[in-house]
Image (tube, coloured by chain):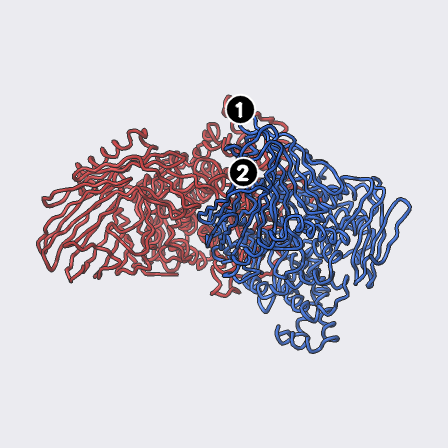
Chain colours: A blue, B red
Amino acid sequence: MIRYLHTDPWRIIQKGFNPKHQRSSESIFSIGNGRFGQRANHEESYSGETLQGSYVAGVYYPDKTRVGWWKNGYPEYFAKVLNSTNWIGIRVWVDGAELDLASCQLIDFYRELDMRRGLLTRRFSAIIGDGKQVDVEAMRFCSMSRDAQAAIRYSVTPVNFSGVVRFESCLDGDVRNHDANYDERFWAPVDQWAEASSGGVVTRTRKTEFELAVAMTHTLNRESVWEAFTSQARAACATEVRVPNGHSAVLHKYVGIVSSLHAPAAQAGEEAIRESLAARDTGFEAMREEHEARWASIWSTVDIRIDGDPEAQQAIRFNIFQLNQTYTGEDARLNIGPKGFTGEKYGGSTYWDTEAYCLPFYMSTKPQQVARQLLIYRYQHLQQAIENARKLGFTGGAALYPMVTMNGEECHNEWEITFEEIHRNGAIAYAIWNYIRYTGDHRYLCEFGLDVLIGIARFWSQRVNYSEPRKGYVILGVTGPNEYENNVNNNWYTNYIATWCLKWCIEALDYVKTHDPKAFAEKALRYELNEEEERTRWMDIISRMYFPVLEGTDVFLQQDGFMDKEQLTAADLDPLERPINQHWSWDRILRSVFIKQADVLQGLYFFEDDFSAAQLKANFDFYEPRTVHESSLSPCVHAILAARLGYEEKAYEMYMRTSRLDLDDYNHEAHEGLHITSMAGTWMAVVQGFGGMRVQDNQLLFSPMLPARWEAYQFRVLFRGQVYTVFVDRTGHRVEVGS
Amino acid sequence: MIRYLHTDPWRIIQKGFNPKHQRSSESIFSIGNGRFGQRANHEESYSGETLQGSYVAGVYYPDKTRVGWWKNGYPEYFAKVLNSTNWIGIRVWVDGAELDLASCQLIDFYRELDMRRGLLTRRFSAIIGDGKQVDVEAMRFCSMSRDAQAAIRYSVTPVNFSGVVRFESCLDGDVRNHDANYDERFWAPVDQWAEASSGGVVTRTRKTEFELAVAMTHTLNRESVWEAFTSQARAACATEVRVPNGHSAVLHKYVGIVSSLHAPAAQAGEEAIRESLAARDTGFEAMREEHEARWASIWSTVDIRIDGDPEAQQAIRFNIFQLNQTYTGEDARLNIGPKGFTGEKYGGSTYWDTEAYCLPFYMSTKPQQVARQLLIYRYQHLQQAIENARKLGFTGGAALYPMVTMNGEECHNEWEITFEEIHRNGAIAYAIWNYIRYTGDHRYLCEFGLDVLIGIARFWSQRVNYSEPRKGYVILGVTGPNEYENNVNNNWYTNYIATWCLKWCIEALDYVKTHDPKAFAEKALRYELNEEEERTRWMDIISRMYFPVLEGTDVFLQQDGFMDKEQLTAADLDPLERPINQHWSWDRILRSVFIKQADVLQGLYFFEDDFSAAQLKANFDFYEPRTVHESSLSPCVHAILAARLGYEEKAYEMYMRTSRLDLDDYNHEAHEGLHITSMAGTWMAVVQGFGGMRVQDNQLLFSPMLPARWEAYQFRVLFRGQVYTVFVDRTGHRVEVGS
């Protein structure tokens, strides 16, 4: 745990500048608007350690696969989020000396992320060269109301001299990904232009040929002459002014960002210019008001208020803020990458995180259409999922959804994950069920859902085999959600969700057959459904699936042979060897009892209604002590189950761990980007955990608990067209309907 | 199976030139002398597909590791055999037109590897340009008697014209490895020179800084003027002569090859010159006589004669020939790479192949010192093996020998092999036992053997854990010899050899303690042996190790859960899907029942005396049908066991498969290089399989069988200072003692 940030209910605050925290701060203070996002890199030159990051949703590059030893079935590429044209750059010279936070003397550095308003602000004084001091203030935002626009206000004030301030504001499309398998360039230059205070750069991704146009225009609060420069994939506008002591030079930079996802490639450049000019014409303050109003509207439905625990309060808002910056649900082509727009790692691609963790958040805080978009994203990838299964030897329309994808094609390239972590297929089916349970939108099955469920059911049907010694069906060679086990047999969670998928598909078949016979007939034909035979096979598997258990107890065994391991608990670990994934060799991790993230417990969370309280307790008591939570997706599930079981302290510990994972950098990796998808788990920890929210028989139920350190909390959810506000305090709880 | 070569008892013959076989022929016709080796690339320019390959023993480059996802404990590099200075190049022009076998018209192409004499010869007629025909004959060898020298005779004879023949003979140190993780250059140029008919090139490996000097000098049978050229890392000597119709221009190229393993780096160049001049002064014919005499001497002890089956005869000599070209046992720094000097694949590094397969061959056909060298190679790597274990979390002097190495450091980088295929440690211990069993050299234990055994025993002692459900020790998370299973629990072979190692170490402790108390005391001190405690722990493990079995049978189960798999046999496979490793995704292979190479059966082969004939039969009958033999190391073990069991047809089938693996290219990979280490298994298949040779109580026993297609066979072995010749024919067998 590393804590250097200050606590505030609505703001993330950094006071003082320590270069060793710069990369983490760049992640934590990231801003975005669902269409594009930007790490909190400094505007001015910075010669210290930094990870430049400017990302545009849906724009990716198929980076040629790098493996040590090729296995049949590996994908040819890993789709990567791209570090794109850097639009924030503003170089600053004071009387000819360049401002660089790594080399000048800094006084009173202050950085603030205002989550209520969506603003990133820095203020500092710098002493440059021979003792000249300037006060600098920079504010920027990615407009939530104008999703192709961003703006920066940058002011420089000499405080002990009068002198010349020079700005050189640039767009730099000559950028690379830090994470590139073969150090290839992902972007090709297309065009650049600059004239006076305006300029632009167009670049195109190699291979995928996404086009990205970024344009800028500027105003300065003092009369000045502008010069413009271009070089390949770069444009810059420079100006200098004499500034009297105590006065300020204030530069406004207005940026338009348009990719070929939102304009014909040939017109992207013009669109970007149009956007930047529109921003300028609106002006910084008016733009900001619009932007703040949009954030206010978002917060009005999504905020969670926690009284009496400022750290918990700050953390939940940080999680909610980042989720809203990452995905708005307006575009079914987009999804939610594990790091959102805050880093390169995990390629910015789609994982099962979306279905298992993010869907409930968007389902409860956004109009129904947003969650539906997330489901349709997978429906649109069904053919690729079938192709993916075919590559692995499956036939007849069996579908295996990818572990990682940008366009439906599998991108991952570790056999133990790519080919074996097949439980992800279950999460896709579960999300459909979860969505319908919440929304009542059964029509979705008739339109899109059944198609996906048939493909998934067929996969499981082929993936099991009958074991004579077990007298039942087994699933061999899998990796469960706990990735600290590979190639195990009969992972309880996988066997359970596989069986559940078959049941759910049969139920869905029945529903569509009854309620929309025409759709059913059409799908039966399209997918060459051999209904009788397939149903019979599925029923047989459902009735004879083998599940490992710890005999004489209610504990479901994570996999065959789990009890052969040395039975230690996390308390036995040397704290210096944690996280074990940074200290132990892989084989040692694999044969240890330690669990990376909820596995059996993930199943108990998903399918809570199928199990008794005694079963839940037995399994939680067994697995929690063995779980090291080295996945960001783990503590939230444990927090929810602990709350269910009345383990208030454990629930609180897990909640704090998930909610402050990045702010307190538990896993020493915030510098790589934020754990965006697990942030939805944080929301679940409050709403489903402490709030005890669940859906049963088309009704929303709450059974709240109040953590001892909290005085009160309140949250809102949307459910079937109504807003419910839940208030919990020491006296009890109440639910208000309507806004 | 691809067969285009002709059968002959002593020669490999290719008639006619088909470019699609060129790369395979380059492998198969490789020549070498233990110090360096050369693929059968054409001397003249060749614009067709080729894999240039010239390799120098012990010279390697640490190629930066390439993996998709880094795991703790992975080595930083993979040590690779290097494609080194190309010394065979002789460009030829006839009246100004260059000879290129890919573009000229070829008549009567003939290539021959004379295994008795160690000569590579090509003869062909070529029609160049406007119908001018030349006869070409090229012969070369890597001298077995002068291990830094090689010679080429290259003659060109105009047969329908008189004209000018130009030779440009070169050394080219500007070479790359086809197999380079990041397309890096492995060599840096150091020096090059050329004057008249002599020249040389010195290059140095980057990072490892091996220096390699290659020098050449030439004679021509006609008076001519020589020109010399150099460019970076290249030297060339050129001359041209007018040759009357029917006469020949005969060029002799004498090459000296000296690496910094055999001379101080600064003197390598001079040494190489000295070697090349010495070769020239000796002359091609005299050098050849010496070389042939050396081969005659080798064959006098190592030849196996098979009557009545020319293909079997040719194959066994091919295997023996290649083994003798690869390793002579004169240098304890060297070892036997899976591809020897015939290709780049597998890095030319040392695997457990050496101990499990190659040792018996060298032990029985070479002076005792050679096998001892192979053991000392590992002794010298003990500290690195301890370091390797330490990296994986083991302590207290536990040693894990590497899966792949050049200098004792682990090079491999797949977790399921690197960290889990730990049975290799057993093979190192087994080799010491096998060597002493064969030679009676118990002193070896006192000098070097015990040190290694203690390190290995300590590894196993830490690697097991006690399982409460099994009431015994288990070994979790391993890969057995059958690499078509990864991360399995209780691989029978691993559990068995682990236990056996502990027993063997205790036996060795007792021996040294009794026979050389001083050495014992010294070692006990050096390795901080806590004798009582360690022995007690080892004895406990020996007495309570768990072994999986198929209940009610004599079958030892390959690993836990093996019977949960769908029980198919190789006969059920679609021939179009074989080899399965080229057709199936890895997960499908892993969860299938199919076995890549002998696993349980490897154990029954190693420890035959521990098991009854009924056990051997039960296991062979169970596992053989499930084995797909997609490792070159598999058929030989099955051949030996089949012979033991009197399964003559199966033994013959397996023998032919192992012995003609490359000649008939069973696995479609001869173009990458030959399976050198499995060639020793071929020898075992005859001597230990058909010949039934084994050692018991310091005696050599034979129980020969004669395959139906053979009329007779004979082989020789060295045993404790005596030569034994075994003759087997239809009438029976006899053993002659003495040469």
Left or right of B495 in this view: A695: right
- Residue B430 position, x and y percent, is 50, 39
Q: Do labels 2 and 1 share a chain?
A: no
Left or right of A611 in this view: A668: left
Q: Bin the neighbour count of mark 1 within 10 Å (Cα to Cα): few under 14, some 14-19, many 20 and up.
A: few
Residue A43 in view (yes/no)? yes
In the rendered view of the protein, which quadrant contains the N terminus of chain B? bottom left
User: Given the image, on which type of amino acid does mark 2 rest?
Assistant: Val
SS class, disc 2: strand
Q: How far apart are marks 2 and 1 (CA)?
A: 76 Å
Q: Bin the neighbour count of mark 2 within 10 Å (Cα to Cα): few under 14, some 14-19, many 20 and up.
A: some
User: What residue is disc 2 on?
Assistant: A241
The label on residue B492 is none
Examine the rendered structure and indicate whether residue A331 appears above or below residue B402: below
- The chain under label 1 reads B
User: Given the image, on which type of amino acid does mark 1 rest?
Assistant: Arg
Q: How many labels does the image show?
A: 2
- The chain under label 2 reads A
- Residue B676 position, x and y percent, is 39, 47
Toward the viewer: A211 or B517? A211
Residue that sits furthest to the right in the current view: A731
Residue A552 in view (yes/no)? no
Examine the rendered structure and indicate whether residue A508 appears above or below residue A371: below
- Name which residue lies at 28% across and 43% down: B172
Left or right of B684 in this view: B228: left
- Residue B192 position, x and y percent, is 26, 37
In this view, the mark in front (2 or 1): 2
Left or right of B459 in this view: B357: left
SS class, disc 1: helix
User: What residue is disc 1 on?
Assistant: B526
- Name which residue lies at 23% across and 51% down: B44
- Residue B631 position, x and y percent, is 46, 52
